[in-house]
């Protein structure tokens, strides 16, 4: 609320990228700033590519009324490639009330997959693994306390059949801690069998 008050006073706009907000597992989704105050000076960004499926290349922007014509014109000038068919189908999907039941269903599925992957990694690594950011979204960061460099760990996991996502820190803050490597684990597209297999292969690659 203080931020909204400042933005109004300063004549500024808040850019709110509400990434993965629908998939919070341990608590209710956080309310958006955009919906807190009528006519809030907020540009609210979201995407259906993450919420529904990756090949649906549609995002959205909630714009305060005074700026709607400007952003509509900007969209026409910058990008005419959004599929009309996809937009019409998505419109029907939303207006017929299918989105909320879908999100509820997928939240349960993703929560179970996330929990299984975290538990499996902890089973193999014990206190040698620490998980961050697993309370929301479709991926988390795992810090492994092992005697391997990041490159060695990455190559070993790849040879074992698991491609891990590296963490790309800004150069000014990139500090490699001795005995620690970090990777991002995505779990949304994995079956429970695959989740167990990933944890087993990573453990075999890092600990052997």
Image (cartoon, grey):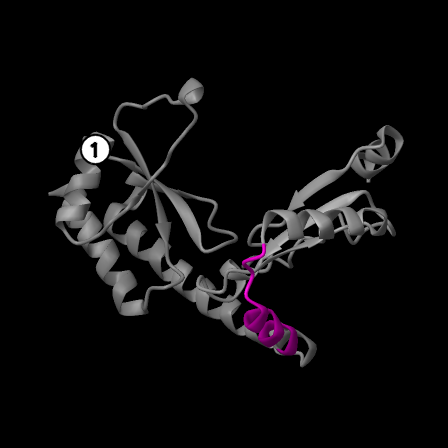
Please provide percent x and percent y for residue 40.
83, 46
Q: Residue at x 24, y 49 (%)?
A: 163
- Whether residue 91 appears in magenta in the rendering, the answer is yes
Quarter in which the C terminus is drawn: top left
Quarter in which the N terminus is drawn: top right
On the picture, is 132 further left or further right than 16? left
Q: Residue furthest top?
A: 172
Q: Residue furthest bottom?
A: 96
Does residue 78 appear in the picture of this structure?
A: yes
Q: Residue at x 85, y 47 (%)?
A: 66
Q: Give the structural element (helix, strand or loop) at label 1.
A: helix
Q: Nearer the viewer, residue 163 or 143?
A: 163
* Residue interval drawn in magenta: 80-92
Say if 53 sits above or below 38 in the image. below
Residue under label 1, please give it: 151
Query: Within the image, what quadrant is residue 60 found in?
Result: bottom right
- Whether residue 60 appears in magenta in the rendering, the answer is no
Q: Residue at x 31, y 50 (%)?
A: 122
Q: Nearer the viewer, residue 193 or 186?
A: 186
Does residue 104 appear in the picture of this structure?
A: no
On the picture, is 91 further left or further right than 128? right
Within 10 Å of disc 1 (Cα), the crowding (few <14, some 14-19, many 20+) is few
Say if 31 sits above or below 190 in the image. above
Say if 165 sits above or below 112 in the image. above
On the picture, is 53 further left or further right than 203? right
């Amino acid at each position: 609320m203080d931020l909204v008050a400042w933005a109004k006073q300063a004549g500024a706009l808040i850019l709110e990228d509400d990434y993965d907000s629908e998939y919070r597992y341990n608590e209710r989704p956080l309310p958006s700033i955009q919906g807190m105050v009528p006519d809030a000076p907020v540009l609210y960004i979201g995407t259906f590519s993450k919420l529904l499926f990756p090949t649906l290349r549609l995002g959205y922007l909630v714009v305060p009324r005074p700026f709607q014509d400007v952003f509509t014109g900007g969209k026409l000038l910058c990008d005419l490639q959004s599929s009309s068919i996809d937009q019409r189908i998505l419109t029907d999907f939303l207006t017929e009330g299918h989105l909320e039941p879908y999100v509820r269903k997928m939240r349960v599925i993703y929560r179970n997959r996330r929990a299984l992957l975290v538990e499996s990694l902890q089973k193999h690594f014990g206190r040698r693994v620490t998980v961050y950011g697993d309370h929301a979204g479709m991926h988390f960061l795992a810090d492994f306390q092992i005697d391997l460099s990041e490159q060695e760990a990455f190559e070993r996991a790849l040879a074992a059949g698991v491609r891990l996502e590296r963490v790309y820190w800004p150069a000014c803050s990139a500090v490699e801690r001795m005995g620690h490597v970090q990777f991002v684990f995505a779990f949304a597209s994995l079956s429970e069998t695959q989740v167990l297999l990933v944890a087993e292969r990573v453990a075999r690659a890092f600990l052997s």
